[in-house]
Image (cartoon, coloured by chain):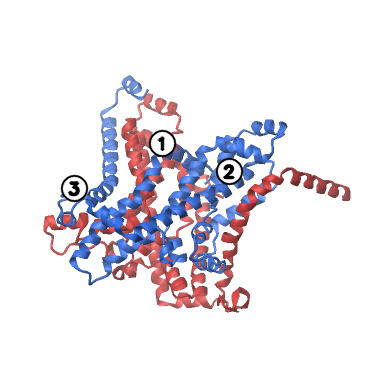
Chain colours: A red, B blue
Amino acid sequence: MKRTNTHSLSATRRQLKRTKQLWLFVLPAVVMVSIFNYIPMYGVIMAFEDFKPSLGFFGSKWVGLEHFVRFFNSYSSSSTIRNTILLSVESLLWTFPIPIIFALLLNQISHARFKRAVQTVTYMPYFISIVVLVSIVNLFLSPYRGFYGAIVSLLELQDPIEPLTDPAFFRTVYIGSTIWQTTGYQSIIYLAALSGVDPALHEAAKIDGASRWQRVLHIDLPTLMPTISIMFIMACGSIMNVGFEKAYLLQNKLNLNVSEVLQTYVYKVGLINAQYSFSAAINLFSTVINIIMLLVMNRVVKKLSDTSLL
Amino acid sequence: MKTKRSHGIRESFGDRVFLFISYALCGLILLAVAYPLYFVLIASVSDPDAVNRGEVLLLPAKTSLDAYIAVFEESQVWTGYRNTILYTALSVLFSLCIVMPAAYALSRKDFPGRGPLVIFFLIAMYFNGGMVPTYLLVDSLGMTNTIWAMVLPSCVNVFHLIIAKTYFETSIPNELREAAELDGCTDFKFFIRIVLPLSKAIISVVGVYVAVATWNSYMNALMYITEESLQPLQIVLRNILLVAQVTSGQSAAMARESEMMKYALIVVTTIPIICVYPFVQKYFEKGVMIGSVKG
């Protein structure tokens, strides 16, 4: 026993020496991730304390679930949670299937240059920042100027709909602009999977008299299923993560009752009002929901299609 | 090859209708995505009053470059531009120098730390402490209102690390390293002289990811930077584009000028980052695929 131990110890030492340079290769990344990803995880504990920066992490008073109780009893909690869930579920329902359909359609196109043009143009908005996207939305959809304003004044509409300030249109604008921005980019992965389809399958189906539509349904779509499952599980794992930047920038006083989501609430309460522990508690709550969703959807999809992420 | 095939078996009527619909829908999508971009472009060179009257729907009207001149007379825009270029260059440099060697080490099957370290990084990808603890950390390190707040916290992205690791695993043959090792080549030399030159694709993909993310990043600056001279372009943009519209009491001429500038400002800030894309497009699609293999 002892002999094998010393033997393995010297073997380990030898191996360490041999891979010394590889350890140096990972060292900077380990240091950076430890500092900027692991240290902030103490936020989990902060949520149960009455954290004061002056008292520090160890000196602050332990208050247990007080912040959670306060959040769930507050007037804003139910509406913020509802807004977050509605916005992300509706987003998922729209922005998840559209890139798949787009990839299937684009896969039909055999004219190489047209296909290339469609791809290049549809990827482009992905590179636009959220600030610019929201500005374009504002300039485009305001009834007083820009594109929509021009239509309103050309048609001489009285009392036009105001999509930017009308709470009924907040989610439509949010989701519509996401579709515009990300459909092309999201479709890359499905197109890549489709390019892996064996042409012989299509040939055989053609000879058997299968129409294009039938081939899409019975060859292309089944090929995509594993990719779709994985992407779906990952999307469900961030169900409580509404893009902070976009929700924050599209927000205004008039649509606040539908546009206030957990992330924007955490920012306002945590950083602007400096209620650190309270916002850490809200953050922890949404992380827990995310993890539960990830695990649940992973099981559901595994049952349904035999693919899983974990 | 495709045309040859379609000559072989005649397409049925239903198939031709289906194909026609596919083309038509793709064409419509193309237009729907391109039009808002085109509209911003033509509005930026048109007279703002003409834009609001609806005369600029298909072609620019009363073209002038006044808006661009006004944008470049704004000193904030120059400062923002300079800061953003600096932050982007530093982020790409730091990120590549830290992520690439680490990804290479993790791709080596004979590296004993591989298993535990991959888990260490994956945990960091799925869990985070949230906005407030991260802010407090950056603040306590004395990095708020410095360049470093814009570069260091987001410098190692675990997702990039994983795609680079997958790339090295699939495209650097093990035999190559063994041969080099026999010739007395150290890991360091092998990485610099052989691995890096073979990995232009992944370097450019990760480089573009980091560059786009930094160029467009808004939240970091919102949290960490309050000093005006350090503010990046996105914050300047937001101040001019989104906040200015709610301030009342400005004169009609000022309102007209800020209206005119908006389109030009969007063009000026977005063109550089969109221009990077065609150069790396062929690598980019490959990179997205590599990323998707292990997700």
| Residue highlighted by disc 3 | B60
Residue A70 or B143: which is nearer the viewer? B143
A209 relative to A247, above or below: above
| Residue highlighted by disc 1 | A220
Q: Chain of mark 3?
A: B
**Closer mark to the observer between disc 1 and disc 3:** 3
| Amino acid type for the residue under numbered disc 3 | Pro
B46 relative to A63, above or below: above
Residue A186 or B103: which is nearer the viewer? B103
Q: Is residue A240 visible?
A: no
How crowded pointer 1 is (Cα within 10 Å; few <14, some 14-19, many 20+) is rated as many
How crowded pointer 2 is (Cα within 10 Å; few <14, some 14-19, many 20+) is rated as many
| Amino acid type for the residue under numbered disc 1 | Asp
| Amino acid type for the residue under numbered disc 2 | Lys
How crowded pointer 3 is (Cα within 10 Å; few <14, some 14-19, many 20+) is rated as some
- In the picture, the disc for residue B165 is 2
Determine whether the residue tagged by mark 1 lies in a helix, strand or loop: helix
Mark pair 1, 3: CA separation? 43 Å
Mark pair 2, 1: CA separation? 30 Å
Q: Chain of mark 2?
A: B
Residue occupying image coordinates x 38% and y 70%: A79
